[in-house]
Amino acid sequence: MPAKPTGTTSTARRKSTASATSRRKPSDKQRPRRREPSSTTPRRRVSRTPRPKALEASYSGRIFRSRLEARWAILLDLLEINWDYEPSHYQVGPELYYLPDFYLPQHRLWLEVKGEAFLDAGSMAKCLAAVAGPTPIPLREAPYTASDRLLLAGSLQSADSGRPLHTLITDAGERRAHLGYATVGPEGVVPLGRPWSTMEASGVKMSRRPAAALRTKLLSPHPVVGSVPADVAAAYRAAASARFDDSRATLAASNNPALLARLALRRAGRPLGRID
Protein backbone atom coordinates (compact mmCIF):
# COMPACT_ATOMS: atom_id res chain seq x y z
CA MET A 1 0.00 0.00 0.00
CA PRO A 2 1.43 3.44 -0.93
CA ALA A 3 2.46 5.56 1.97
CA LYS A 4 0.39 8.59 2.78
CA PRO A 5 1.99 11.92 2.00
CA THR A 6 3.41 13.62 4.98
CA GLY A 7 2.38 17.13 6.08
CA THR A 8 5.61 18.62 4.70
CA THR A 9 4.30 18.94 1.14
CA SER A 10 1.06 20.54 2.28
CA THR A 11 2.94 23.02 4.42
CA ALA A 12 5.29 23.95 1.55
CA ARG A 13 2.30 24.51 -0.75
CA ARG A 14 0.69 26.86 1.77
CA LYS A 15 3.91 28.86 2.15
CA SER A 16 4.29 29.17 -1.63
CA THR A 17 0.71 30.41 -1.97
CA ALA A 18 1.22 32.95 0.81
CA SER A 19 4.44 34.23 -0.79
CA ALA A 20 2.77 34.67 -4.17
CA THR A 21 -0.10 36.51 -2.53
CA SER A 22 2.30 38.88 -0.80
CA ARG A 23 3.90 39.72 -4.14
CA ARG A 24 0.59 40.70 -5.71
CA LYS A 25 -0.30 44.37 -6.02
CA PRO A 26 -2.64 45.56 -3.30
CA SER A 27 -6.24 46.00 -4.28
CA ASP A 28 -7.85 49.44 -4.57
CA LYS A 29 -9.14 49.05 -1.05
CA GLN A 30 -5.68 48.26 0.27
CA ARG A 31 -3.83 51.03 -1.60
CA PRO A 32 -3.29 54.31 0.28
CA ARG A 33 -5.50 57.03 -1.12
CA ARG A 34 -3.80 59.90 -2.90
CA ARG A 35 -4.59 63.23 -1.31
CA GLU A 36 -6.14 65.61 -3.80
CA PRO A 37 -5.30 69.30 -3.40
CA SER A 38 -8.00 71.29 -1.74
CA SER A 39 -9.96 73.56 -4.05
CA THR A 40 -9.62 76.31 -1.45
CA THR A 41 -5.82 76.10 -1.31
CA PRO A 42 -4.21 78.23 -4.03
CA ARG A 43 -1.53 76.51 -6.03
CA ARG A 44 1.83 78.21 -5.93
CA ARG A 45 3.26 78.87 -9.36
CA VAL A 46 6.96 78.14 -9.51
CA SER A 47 8.95 79.68 -12.33
CA ARG A 48 11.39 77.33 -13.96
CA THR A 49 13.50 80.21 -15.23
CA PRO A 50 16.31 81.03 -12.79
CA ARG A 51 16.30 84.61 -11.60
CA PRO A 52 19.33 86.50 -12.92
CA LYS A 53 21.77 87.99 -10.46
CA ALA A 54 23.65 91.25 -10.88
CA LEU A 55 26.99 92.22 -9.40
CA GLU A 56 26.88 95.22 -7.08
CA ALA A 57 29.43 97.96 -7.55
CA SER A 58 30.65 100.82 -5.38
CA TYR A 59 31.34 104.06 -7.21
CA SER A 60 31.45 107.74 -6.29
CA GLY A 61 30.01 107.21 -2.80
CA ARG A 62 27.05 105.11 -3.93
CA ILE A 63 26.39 101.37 -3.96
CA PHE A 64 24.85 100.42 -7.30
CA ARG A 65 22.77 97.29 -7.74
CA SER A 66 24.65 96.36 -10.90
CA ARG A 67 27.87 97.23 -12.68
CA LEU A 68 25.83 98.36 -15.66
CA GLU A 69 24.25 101.04 -13.44
CA ALA A 70 27.72 102.05 -12.23
CA ARG A 71 28.92 102.32 -15.84
CA TRP A 72 26.02 104.62 -16.62
CA ALA A 73 26.97 106.79 -13.65
CA ILE A 74 30.51 106.93 -15.05
CA LEU A 75 29.17 107.91 -18.48
CA LEU A 76 27.02 110.68 -17.00
CA ASP A 77 29.99 111.98 -14.99
CA LEU A 78 32.20 112.03 -18.09
CA LEU A 79 29.48 113.94 -19.96
CA GLU A 80 29.16 116.29 -16.95
CA ILE A 81 25.49 115.43 -16.48
CA ASN A 82 24.39 115.62 -12.84
CA TRP A 83 22.51 112.65 -11.41
CA ASP A 84 20.69 111.40 -8.32
CA TYR A 85 20.64 107.65 -7.73
CA GLU A 86 17.38 106.02 -6.56
CA PRO A 87 16.01 109.18 -4.91
CA SER A 88 12.50 107.90 -4.10
CA HIS A 89 9.86 105.17 -4.42
CA TYR A 90 6.62 105.91 -6.28
CA GLN A 91 3.32 104.10 -6.76
CA VAL A 92 2.56 103.94 -10.48
CA GLY A 93 -0.42 101.57 -10.43
CA PRO A 94 -2.83 99.73 -8.12
CA GLU A 95 -0.16 97.14 -7.23
CA LEU A 96 2.96 98.56 -8.89
CA TYR A 97 5.64 100.38 -6.90
CA TYR A 98 8.63 101.78 -8.73
CA LEU A 99 12.10 102.89 -7.66
CA PRO A 100 13.68 104.60 -10.71
CA ASP A 101 17.46 104.32 -11.05
CA PHE A 102 18.51 107.89 -11.91
CA TYR A 103 17.06 111.38 -11.99
CA LEU A 104 18.84 113.99 -14.12
CA PRO A 105 17.94 117.35 -12.54
CA GLN A 106 19.54 119.49 -15.26
CA HIS A 107 17.30 117.88 -17.86
CA ARG A 108 14.23 117.05 -15.70
CA LEU A 109 14.38 113.45 -16.82
CA TRP A 110 14.18 109.98 -15.28
CA LEU A 111 16.58 107.27 -16.45
CA GLU A 112 16.12 103.52 -15.92
CA VAL A 113 19.00 101.09 -16.57
CA LYS A 114 18.15 97.53 -17.55
CA GLY A 115 20.05 94.57 -18.92
CA GLU A 116 18.03 92.40 -21.31
CA ALA A 117 17.84 89.55 -18.76
CA PHE A 118 16.23 91.90 -16.21
CA LEU A 119 13.53 93.51 -18.38
CA ASP A 120 10.56 91.43 -17.21
CA ALA A 121 6.79 91.97 -17.26
CA GLY A 122 6.80 94.01 -14.06
CA SER A 123 9.71 96.32 -14.87
CA MET A 124 8.39 97.08 -18.36
CA ALA A 125 4.95 97.93 -16.97
CA LYS A 126 6.55 100.26 -14.40
CA CYS A 127 8.58 102.15 -17.00
CA LEU A 128 5.52 102.72 -19.17
CA ALA A 129 3.26 103.70 -16.27
CA ALA A 130 5.90 106.07 -14.86
CA VAL A 131 5.20 108.58 -17.63
CA ALA A 132 1.84 107.56 -19.12
CA GLY A 133 -0.02 105.53 -16.49
CA PRO A 134 -2.79 106.44 -14.04
CA THR A 135 -0.31 107.95 -11.53
CA PRO A 136 2.86 109.05 -13.34
CA ILE A 137 5.87 109.91 -11.23
CA PRO A 138 6.53 113.63 -10.64
CA LEU A 139 9.50 115.76 -11.51
CA ARG A 140 11.66 116.65 -8.53
CA GLU A 141 11.53 120.41 -8.93
CA ALA A 142 8.69 122.82 -8.29
CA PRO A 143 5.89 122.81 -9.33
CA TYR A 144 6.45 119.00 -9.26
CA THR A 145 4.37 118.30 -12.33
CA ALA A 146 4.05 114.79 -13.73
CA SER A 147 6.98 113.51 -15.72
CA ASP A 148 6.16 112.88 -19.37
CA ARG A 149 9.33 111.06 -20.51
CA LEU A 150 11.77 108.42 -19.29
CA LEU A 151 14.97 107.11 -20.84
CA LEU A 152 15.17 103.31 -20.84
CA ALA A 153 18.91 102.72 -20.96
CA GLY A 154 20.38 99.35 -21.84
CA SER A 155 23.83 98.08 -22.62
CA LEU A 156 26.68 100.55 -23.05
CA GLN A 157 28.26 100.10 -26.43
CA SER A 158 31.34 101.69 -27.90
CA ALA A 159 30.69 104.67 -30.17
CA ASP A 160 33.22 103.42 -32.73
CA SER A 161 30.51 102.29 -35.17
CA GLY A 162 28.20 105.30 -34.75
CA ARG A 163 26.27 107.42 -32.25
CA PRO A 164 24.67 105.15 -29.61
CA LEU A 165 20.89 105.25 -29.31
CA HIS A 166 18.66 104.60 -26.30
CA THR A 167 14.89 104.16 -25.95
CA LEU A 168 12.92 107.23 -24.94
CA ILE A 169 9.44 106.57 -23.47
CA THR A 170 7.03 109.51 -23.76
CA ASP A 171 3.39 110.11 -22.90
CA ALA A 172 1.04 109.49 -25.85
CA GLY A 173 -2.16 110.30 -23.95
CA GLU A 174 -5.05 108.03 -22.94
CA ARG A 175 -2.73 105.82 -20.89
CA ARG A 176 -0.53 104.92 -23.80
CA ALA A 177 3.18 105.49 -24.24
CA HIS A 178 5.30 106.18 -27.32
CA LEU A 179 8.58 104.34 -27.83
CA GLY A 180 11.25 106.26 -29.69
CA TYR A 181 15.00 106.76 -29.70
CA ALA A 182 17.26 109.48 -28.35
CA THR A 183 20.96 110.30 -28.06
CA VAL A 184 22.80 111.21 -24.85
CA GLY A 185 25.51 113.86 -24.71
CA PRO A 186 26.64 116.99 -22.85
CA GLU A 187 23.57 118.73 -24.26
CA GLY A 188 21.35 116.16 -22.56
CA VAL A 189 18.89 113.65 -24.02
CA VAL A 190 17.89 114.57 -27.57
CA PRO A 191 15.01 112.72 -29.33
CA LEU A 192 15.83 111.34 -32.75
CA GLY A 193 13.10 110.82 -35.33
CA ARG A 194 9.50 109.81 -34.74
CA PRO A 195 8.31 107.14 -32.27
CA TRP A 196 8.51 103.63 -33.71
CA SER A 197 5.84 102.00 -31.52
CA THR A 198 3.11 102.60 -28.94
CA MET A 199 2.25 100.47 -25.90
CA GLU A 200 -0.44 100.48 -23.23
CA ALA A 201 0.47 102.04 -19.89
CA SER A 202 -2.30 100.68 -17.66
CA GLY A 203 -0.30 100.59 -14.43
CA VAL A 204 -0.93 96.84 -14.18
CA LYS A 205 1.76 94.18 -14.46
CA MET A 206 1.84 92.61 -17.91
CA SER A 207 0.90 88.96 -18.43
CA ARG A 208 4.29 88.16 -19.91
CA ARG A 209 7.69 89.74 -20.38
CA PRO A 210 8.55 91.49 -23.66
CA ALA A 211 9.65 89.11 -26.41
CA ALA A 212 13.38 88.70 -27.02
CA ALA A 213 13.27 90.69 -30.26
CA LEU A 214 11.52 93.60 -28.53
CA ARG A 215 13.96 93.55 -25.60
CA THR A 216 16.84 93.82 -28.05
CA LYS A 217 15.15 96.68 -29.90
CA LEU A 218 14.53 98.49 -26.62
CA LEU A 219 17.90 97.99 -24.97
CA SER A 220 20.43 97.39 -27.75
CA PRO A 221 19.33 99.43 -30.79
CA HIS A 222 21.62 99.87 -33.74
CA PRO A 223 23.67 103.09 -33.54
CA VAL A 224 23.28 106.00 -35.91
CA VAL A 225 25.91 105.62 -38.59
CA GLY A 226 28.07 108.71 -38.95
CA SER A 227 30.57 110.81 -37.10
CA VAL A 228 30.37 111.05 -33.32
CA PRO A 229 31.62 114.04 -31.30
CA ALA A 230 35.03 113.19 -29.90
CA ASP A 231 34.04 113.84 -26.26
CA VAL A 232 30.94 111.64 -26.57
CA ALA A 233 32.86 108.82 -28.22
CA ALA A 234 35.55 108.97 -25.54
CA ALA A 235 32.98 108.95 -22.73
CA TYR A 236 31.15 105.89 -24.08
CA ARG A 237 34.42 104.07 -24.72
CA ALA A 238 35.71 104.74 -21.20
CA ALA A 239 32.45 103.83 -19.43
CA ALA A 240 32.01 100.62 -21.43
CA SER A 241 35.58 99.44 -20.82
CA ALA A 242 36.04 100.54 -17.20
CA ARG A 243 37.46 97.72 -15.08
CA PHE A 244 36.23 96.78 -11.60
CA ASP A 245 38.10 95.08 -8.78
CA ASP A 246 36.13 91.85 -8.23
CA SER A 247 37.25 91.47 -4.63
CA ARG A 248 36.20 94.99 -3.60
CA ALA A 249 33.53 95.73 -6.24
CA THR A 250 35.11 99.12 -6.88
CA LEU A 251 36.83 100.70 -9.85
CA ALA A 252 40.16 98.96 -10.30
CA ALA A 253 43.36 100.93 -9.82
CA SER A 254 44.55 99.52 -13.16
CA ASN A 255 42.19 101.84 -15.07
CA ASN A 256 43.64 104.69 -17.07
CA PRO A 257 45.03 107.21 -14.53
CA ALA A 258 43.62 110.11 -16.55
CA LEU A 259 40.13 108.52 -16.32
CA LEU A 260 40.42 108.02 -12.55
CA ALA A 261 41.66 111.58 -12.08
CA ARG A 262 38.75 113.00 -14.03
CA LEU A 263 36.16 110.92 -12.17
CA ALA A 264 37.71 112.02 -8.86
CA LEU A 265 36.51 115.57 -9.63
CA ARG A 266 32.91 114.46 -9.09
CA ARG A 267 31.12 112.84 -6.16
CA ALA A 268 27.66 111.23 -6.01
CA GLY A 269 26.55 112.83 -9.26
CA ARG A 270 27.82 116.37 -8.59
CA PRO A 271 31.06 118.25 -9.36
CA LEU A 272 33.38 118.86 -6.43
CA GLY A 273 34.63 122.12 -7.86
CA ARG A 274 37.97 123.19 -9.23
CA ILE A 275 41.00 121.38 -7.84
CA ASP A 276 44.38 122.93 -8.69
Image (spheres, rainbow, N blue to C red):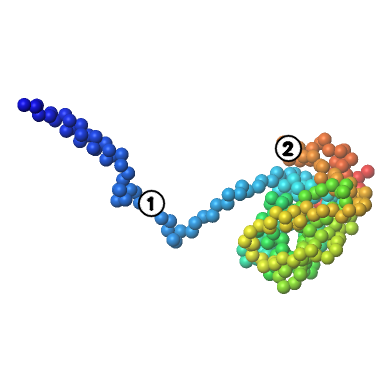
Identified by mark 1, the residue type is Arg
Identified by mark 2, the residue type is Asp
Is residue 266 at least partly visible in the picture? Answer: no
The quarter of the picture where the N terminus appears is top left
Q: Which residue, given by chain and number where applicable, does mark 2 sit on?
A: 246
Residue at point 80%, 56% (across, down): 166
Instruction: Indicate the quadrant where residue 111 lies.
Output: bottom right
Secondary structure beneath dot 1 equals loop
The residue nearer to you, when weighing 169 against 11, is 11
Is residue 9 at least partly visible in the picture? Answer: yes
Residue at point 33%, 48% (across, down): 31
The quarter of the picture where the C terminus appears is top right
Instruction: Indicate the quadrant where residue 40 lies.
Output: bottom left
Q: Which residue, given by chain and number where applicable, does mark 1 sit on?
A: 34
Residue at point 34%, 49% (across, down): 32
Residue 14 x/y as whole percent: 20, 36
Residue 242 x/y as whole percent: 81, 42
Above or below residue 50? Residue 20 is above
Q: Alpha-carbon neighbours of circle 1 within 10 Å: few (<14), some, or many (≥20)?
A: few
Evaluate if marks 2 and 1 touch, with contact meaning CB atoms under 8 Å apart. no
Question: Given the current orientation, which residue lies at the most extreme left position?
Answer: 1
Question: Given the current orientation, which residue lies at the most extreme bottom position?
Answer: 174
Q: Is residue 93 left or right of residue 216?
A: left
Secondary structure beneath dot 2 equals loop
Return the disc, 2 or 1, that comes first in the chain's sequence.
1
Residue at point 20%, 34% (across, down): 13
